[in-house]
Image (cartoon, coloured by chain):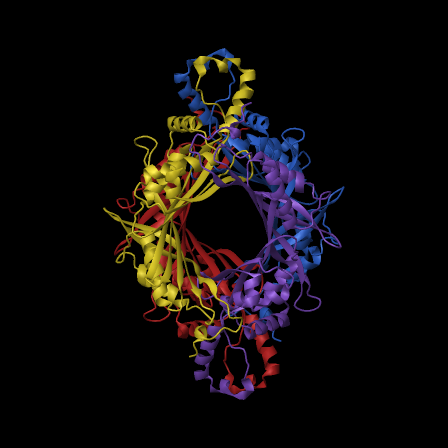
Chain colours: A red, B purple, C yellow, D blue
Amino acid sequence: MKDVHAMVPDHGNLLLARVGIEGIRKPLVVRRPDRGVTLTATFSLAVDLPAERKGSDLSRNAELLAEEIDWPDTRPVASLEEACRTIARVLLERHPYATRSEVRASAAYFLPRAIAPGRESLEDYLLLAGARGERTPEGLRIRRSIGAEAVGMTACPCAMESARGLLAKEYPALASAALAGLPIVSHNQRNRTRLTFDLDGGAEIEADRIVEAIEAAQSSPTYAILKRGDEAQLVVDAHRRPRFVEDVARELLASLPARFPTLPDDCGVALETRSEESIHKYDVIASHGTTMGALRRA
Amino acid sequence: MKDVHAMVPDHGNLLLARVGIEGIRKPLVVRRPDRGVTLTATFSLAVDLPAERKGSDLSRNAELLAEEIDWPDTRPVASLEEACRTIARVLLERHPYATRSEVRASAAYFLPRAIAPGRESLEDYLLLAGARGERTPEGLRIRRSIGAEAVGMTACPCAMESARGLLAKEYPALASAALAGLPIVSHNQRNRTRLTFDLDGGAEIEADRIVEAIEAAQSSPTYAILKRGDEAQLVVDAHRRPRFVEDVARELLASLPARFPTLPDDCGVALETRSEESIHKYDVIASHGTTMGALRRA
Amino acid sequence: MKDVHAMVPDHGNLLLARVGIEGIRKPLVVRRPDRGVTLTATFSLAVDLPAERKGSDLSRNAELLAEEIDWPDTRPVASLEEACRTIARVLLERHPYATRSEVRASAAYFLPRAIAPGRESLEDYLLLAGARGERTPEGLRIRRSIGAEAVGMTACPCAMESARGLLAKEYPALASAALAGLPIVSHNQRNRTRLTFDLDGGAEIEADRIVEAIEAAQSSPTYAILKRGDEAQLVVDAHRRPRFVEDVARELLASLPARFPTLPDDCGVALETRSEESIHKYDVIASHGTTMGALRRA
Amino acid sequence: MKDVHAMVPDHGNLLLARVGIEGIRKPLVVRRPDRGVTLTATFSLAVDLPAERKGSDLSRNAELLAEEIDWPDTRPVASLEEACRTIARVLLERHPYATRSEVRASAAYFLPRAIAPGRESLEDYLLLAGARGERTPEGLRIRRSIGAEAVGMTACPCAMESARGLLAKEYPALASAALAGLPIVSHNQRNRTRLTFDLDGGAEIEADRIVEAIEAAQSSPTYAILKRGDEAQLVVDAHRRPRFVEDVARELLASLPARFPTLPDDCGVALETRSEESIHKYDVIASHGTTMGALRRA
């Protein structure tokens, strides 16, 4: 049978940066100290393609994915990003003509949370991982990325100040010392924040710590189970920590040096935070990319 | 050439209720008193298929759509639901073996809105339309549906009361007569409400009136342009009209007899309202189906 | 604290058919004979709301979900539809004012598949389940639904006949007996078919059997791992079983009496099949609803 | 009223690269030689935020969008990318603290197409545009991007060769000279290709030309209206131009120097092509970024 992929291209001798498969879903068991956690992950895998080769052997991508992570019960992985690292390495082994590989994966995952004792439930987050491999004179170099997305709440500091001004005209009593610190109405909404670290070498980052960092930067985390008193507490707390997306972004970035002291200076950091504004039909976002070193020097 | 569609089916002599095309996009010009409004509409068209026929002549669906609404500049329609009515009729003409036809369409559309003079901008809504045709002994019978979806805001009445209770312990002054009526912090969020009318015969419903009815039932409409004072006003107003999804649904349904006095009693009404809760990661919804007659008797 | 939900509604004394929560994600462990299978499921839960009550106690929905299915490792369920049945029952217990409950759930799930020995991998499907509860004079009545969606391939029988005609003019040799049965080029594409059963009482349906029924009705199942020879085999096989969506629908419906002989006659059957046509930018669909009894009599 | 946005940030003195609004929808009238074309466009607008300022004045974003493009009947624009260029400029005027601005827009748009005389209909494409502004010592510098996405068909060259091999065993007659060039069955599917140009200065690119370039690189364009003979022709033609995503990418890139001779060498080119494989449940993609200069030298 003719190996069509290995033929010379008909349509121009051009290198292509990425050829691969996207949106392939797989179950995955991640080993935790105490147990295995099963994820339903969605993967994308790609390699580059040199100018002199017609096609990338894409059947190898699904094949190596099956070999590395199918049959999760007998083949658990250390983490989603470790699975990505392995896949990025094997991609370069199975595509000998390629010089770069790229793997991305995402999966819903769950952490126990409670606003108060007896309210514990599993909250859902998004786990993000990736790896980029490169064939260098010194051998394969693999960079991993690990991130998470958490949904929480933001309350707007600006609308709160404006509403305070507006209400003060109608209720002069609001100015009394007895009401100092009273939280004032504002708009609040779902905030969706995504934080990813991109790093060389062996440093480890626990996804749960990333979620904690995000939730600490929002006006409040959100919870599936809220009894009446809990709702009141969450709402009051959130209005005592009003946050623009700018504030969420900066508070989160500023917290990283203390939260992740062992990450190397060249560890990349990418963040996007999105508030699904209750007063508008569109979203408000802030995003930024930097390094742990730059954050430490800031 | 063999007419494969007209052959006897190989796989069981079964009537099929709906065979058609989905997700075909078309531009459309709707004639308004003063001008034409161009919509980018997405259509679905289907007919039933009798047991003795292998296939539905689906190429006719795209063909009749092109004949009826392509070239919008020279072929404007009275409204999206009138276009659906025409298409439902022509579907039964072009599929002589069919006894029922069904057309659905949706399109973004825009209305000018302003929270205050000088803040006018175009807000986006979703226009919904449909038609169902039936071949009866008396000839074709076509029912149309016309609806809209509007995004606004809801503020929660329950969390407001709970927060009032919680804050009253810390701020006894809140109980003073001087602060009666002060809006108290609550959670608020995007609310997405969809209302559709389903009717026989010739009654007309203006989509703009449906949007107005929806926006009047939410805690507040939302706006693209809000200067600081506007934000304060919107937030205070919304907290003075706190609404569960149940309240939005009932207020909207209860308003319909007065807003649409000429609609016949057998006009169907379907509603879904969804609050994208800021305190939870999931949505809260209320939905109901009824008739104008039942609403008038309630 | 005031119980706002239990108050009389401000906005019209109207029953609402469905008030609930949508889009709450949970991990779930389904007990299988040999092992537990972990799913990431998305749930919707609703009850009706009587005219005289302002709000539905929605916090109970998330609470009972946590009680019934959180902590999957210690609290496995028999199946997704059994979890739905339990939740539909508990919803009516926790909302004493409600007369109906409704639960829907969906989750990606995986089955091993191989086009040939040594090519085994996990293919992904969608598992669908639901339950509707009703408070009757004889006690609670719960109907369950169980379904699945599978992606496969359809090749068009009509384009194949037309292409045969066209090619016969250029290649008269095609008419020779030596080429009888040669599969001819056609358009083929992803076909996404969903089949759901709706039933009272205790009959069991295995989701894997639903997937098998769907895959047998498409021109071909699809596979993650296909080496060159496998691709050829799959393509040839699919072109030897060309199928309109009408054919997929009818072949699937016609196969159900033999595949599911023990299902009662009043068991509802709903089907939708969608071909993401390669020759058009829009989809082609067929859908139908019937009962096992009607299929047995057809 | 306090200007909260202008305050010093509470949460770390960090520059943020992008703060803005996303997903705001607007109608837009594009002036064409003969008429106005109305688009429903979705916009994202952002600027950077210096370390010493708490918030970006986001209300200005919606405000300037309303001023520049609302009321499309009286305020037509030359093109979507010209609208983006204007908005990118005005963003820097209205956010005097910002040094960079970024605008992205997309909109469905329609072109007349016919596989044969008398089959003309409007096919839908996606128009993509953007602009990035930068405050430099020499004044504002604005780069625009302009692109399009077109859905067509790819037929796989590899499966065709493999199927030829497989069928040749069963039908030795296939090897006869009388059948040379007979198109053989393969898998085919929707292909979605996106091509974007990124350029400084004043060069113009017509979106219709981008769509033509994409459609010429696929195995075949697709059409809404196909009578039986048309389907056969399209299927046969597509199988005579089998294309991997790699082929689509290279053929498209290789065609650009001849199609766009006046584009400057530093004009950026970005491409992604995705085949929604009929034989797999996942997509296959190729993507690449380069410049017109590099393509000319290749």
Is D106 left, or right, of A127 in this rendering? right
Q: Position of residue D15 (x, y in %)?
A: 54, 61
Compared to residue C186, the image places residue C30 above or below, namely below
* Viewer-nearest residue: A135 or B183: B183
Kindly tell me whether residue A92 is visible in this rendering. no
Is B197 left, or right, of D11 in this rendering? right
Q: Position of residue A42 (x, y in %)?
A: 41, 46
Q: Residue furthest left?
A: C34
| Residue at 69% across, 63% down | B120
* Viewer-nearest residue: D179 or B254: B254
Is A77 left, or right, of C56 in this rendering? left
* Viewer-nearest residue: A270 or D63: D63
Q: Position of residue D277 (x, y in %)?
A: 46, 35
Kindly tell me whether residue C59 is visible in this rendering. yes
Compared to residue C72, the image places residue B253 above or below, namely below
Q: Position of residue C121 (x, y in %)?
A: 33, 38
